[in-house]
Image (tube, coloured by chain):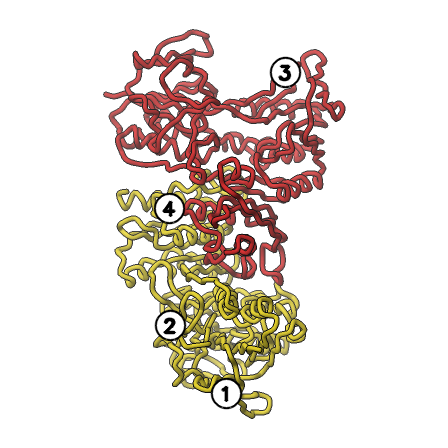
Chain colours: A yellow, B red
Amino acid sequence: MPKLLVIGGMAAGMSAASKVRRLRPEWEVTVLEAGEDPSYGACGLPYWIGGAVVQMDDLYALSAEEVRARGIDVRLRQRALALLEGKKRLRVEDLPSGGTYEEPYDALLIATGSRALLPALRGLEGDNLFTMHDLGDGRRLQRFLDEGRRRSAVVWGTGYIGIEMAENLAARGVAVTLINRSARVMRSLVPEVRDRVLRELEDHGVRVLLEVQVLEAVRDGASIVSLRTDRGDLPADLFLVATGVRPATDFLEGSPVPRSAEGAIQVDETCATGVHGIWAAGDCCQVRHLVTGRPAYLPLGTTANKMGRVAGSAIAGERERFPGVVGTAITRAFGLEVGVTGLSPDQAREAGFDPVEAVIEAGTRAGYYPGGGGTLVHLTADRRGRLLGAQVCGPEGVKGRIDTAAAALTGGMKVEDLAMLDMAYAPPFAPVWDPLLVAAGVLKAKLGR
Amino acid sequence: MPKLLVIGGMAAGMSAASKVRRLRPEWEVTVLEAGEDPSYGACGLPYWIGGAVVQMDDLYALSAEEVRARGIDVRLRQRALALLEGKKRLRVEDLPSGGTYEEPYDALLIATGSRALLPALRGLEGDNLFTMHDLGDGRRLQRFLDEGRRRSAVVWGTGYIGIEMAENLAARGVAVTLINRSARVMRSLVPEVRDRVLRELEDHGVRVLLEVQVLEAVRDGASIVSLRTDRGDLPADLFLVATGVRPATDFLEGSPVPRSAEGAIQVDETCATGVHGIWAAGDCCQVRHLVTGRPAYLPLGTTANKMGRVAGSAIAGERERFPGVVGTAITRAFGLEVGVTGLSPDQAREAGFDPVEAVIEAGTRAGYYPGGGGTLVHLTADRRGRLLGAQVCGPEGVKGRIDTAAAALTGGMKVEDLAMLDMAYAPPFAPVWDPLLVAAGVLKAKLGR
């Protein structure tokens, strides 16, 4: 009876385990999870902190007991230490006892995800320093907020977690200062879209400081009292760092599993690593960027779920493919939705394209129809006409327009075809020329097509 | 100095006239409009009746005076009688005087749109019988509603105008009975989606009767008092007929301009008719259906705008193409959004495909995130895997999912590629598996792909 060992009991690992369980009921399926919970919705953590999500239990897809009842042997607080590939075994630490043991496998799925990356900074530790990466982080911050009156926070990092935490800490009555080392927001926002996001944050009382050099974390006993920066001291009751993640693959050091310079595992369309019997999926992996055709590290829950399903299918001997991503992401800053897909002009240049861009503002509904508001649409294309990327921000309808652009990117659509796309129109939902069509028309004219 | 004559001052005609005005400032541009207003937003009429749109003026894109100020000679209440193609002239009736004259042209754009089709039924005329096709219709109904207490209406036709009028008459406190000769709703809704639309209408007090045979309009003097049907008499204070439209092209009888059996003008991708110097655009034309590859009659404002722009560009000697449509449409019935794109299974069969379908219900947001609700997604594919159509209904996000499917259809996407599409995810906007991805996954499994 073959045994599948899955390292990591989150989105990718649990998806794969469930798929194999269904397709191969006779197999033994074991999941080792380093944390205290399997299969949770980490993306909902900011909203649990802010209060929109009331019950933390709601964030679990399944409890450990439910997973076990489905015939998956999930073991919590078990950490992978080293891959003994020649022996088809994994060296594991039992975190509660500190003891180690070797776990055998016939098939191995690496789904260890990512870990929060803390900046190397003197003094950056303390009982009021938080990350927001897993359920344990969420519990710790929730407890801290519940325990006393917390008036102020510094959130370090302007990716989507930083933005969502700024909103949700503000919802708890905390005065938030949001800082970032560079001027970049959500990795790649163009200036027009970025500035609108920053304005929305500031309009809701979030103080934003970009291009800040953090010099030192000033501590008093077990706590940080302020961040010393080139823009002055930033005192606060709590400090949240969301400056990025890296693949949790250190235990693969010395193994033949191929990894990129940043440690992301290289897999093919079936999530196979090329090492016999070993697959990988989720935030510990590179993915293929369908616009550049090259591998990229873009860890996201939705991708992890897809890869997990494909990996489970491949391990069970069925045929599914994960072709890759186009770099789609969305978040919300208070009343403003903001989404991206494909490449920004800078990213396009880096990838060797000759980008041309256009940005427009248009209403989200027919001009005479009440509600809605102005939405910004920024498009990037190669000079030869191929659509390369889209960014949209506005009060509503951003996901739909970004998804439409994502489908267009996936199909390799030209800007002139996007400009004539048969998008849905009725007065409550869009102007007769959808903002995406308007932007494509402007870009088409710029390209002389 | 060449002279462009445009017949029809609505979406297609005004778009073309404006485009030519911009590109060829030296040309003479004349627009003949049979009605009282140029360039209006007819799609907003139901919402003006219901009260969401407060000012009728808001429905005008431009007034006749504004159009003239831009150098377009727009003449109202001028009706095309006959095309004298050999003489490059149009015979026109001046409606106020009843006199006729011949108007010369160098280039002619036919943009006469469509006209409401009244069923052939004894007694079907009266001062309380309405259609909802142009601004004049809207004014008449608004006046009628304002003049007295109107308690009840029969709306005949379950296309989007019938549905929108049911909602907006209900908003005016009128008890609505919505009837249709067949069981079809919005032309092609599959039973699952159709039944949910019907339930939403009935939940909001609209009485719906399908497969009704209307036998006679019973009149008392100048008014209709009831419709006699095989399901009993349907008395009402007002009767609104929205059973469809046909191309307004009767004046082309005997001309060489090519028309389909139903009278829709046949044009190529540049809106040329093939007759020298004559173009056509908008609701009087056939369009190419990009899924079947065949011509279809699908009159919609968004298509008319696109064709008008392309026709204007072509007339001015520039190069733009209108590739066609995929059959996208959206409407709202009270709290339910409903959209379609591509082919239904029946339409697919008629077009020679071997369709396979799947329908799912899923949440519009992450399960733990408040708000949203269940959305139905129905997908149709050819047995070989090509996506053929989508129908979606739910409380939010329908336009985005339909537009995404429309882009996928335009690109000729396969179901397995849609199942892995990189759609935007964050808890307020979607579950980690978007309902569209879930539906594609189920259909993919049915197809054995």
**What is the CA distance from the residue labelled 4 to the residue labelled 1?**
54 Å
Task: Indicate which disc residue A181 carries.
Answer: 2
Task: Indicate which disc residue A91 carries.
Answer: 1
Mark 4 residue element: helix
> Closer to the camera, B187 or B292?
B292
The quarter holding residue A123 reads: bottom left
Q: Seen in the image, is A164 located left or right of residue B15?
A: right
| Labels 3 and 4 within one chain | no
Q: Would you place residue B438 above or below residue A178 in this image?
A: above
Q: Amino acid at mark 1?
A: Arg
| Labels 2 and 3 within one chain | no
Mark 3 residue element: loop
Task: Indicate which disc residue A439 carries.
Answer: 4
Nearer mark to the viewer, of 2 and 3: 3
Q: Seen in the image, is B178 located left or right of residue A396?
A: right
The image shows residue A97 at horizontal and vertical percentages of: 59, 91
Mark 2 residue element: loop
Are the residues tagged 3 and 4 within 8 Å (C-beta)?
no
Nearer mark to the viewer, of 3 and 4: 3
The image shows residue B42 at horizontal and vertical percentages of: 51, 30
The image shows residue A316 at horizontal and vertical percentages of: 52, 69
Which chain hosts label 2?
A: A
Q: Is residue B281 visible?
A: yes
Q: Amino acid at mark 4?
A: Ala
Residue identifier under label 3:
B125
Q: Would you place residue A126 above or below residue B308 in this image?
A: below
Q: Would you place residue B252 above or below residue A225 in this image?
A: above
| Labels 4 and 1 within one chain | yes
Q: Amino acid at mark 2?
A: Arg
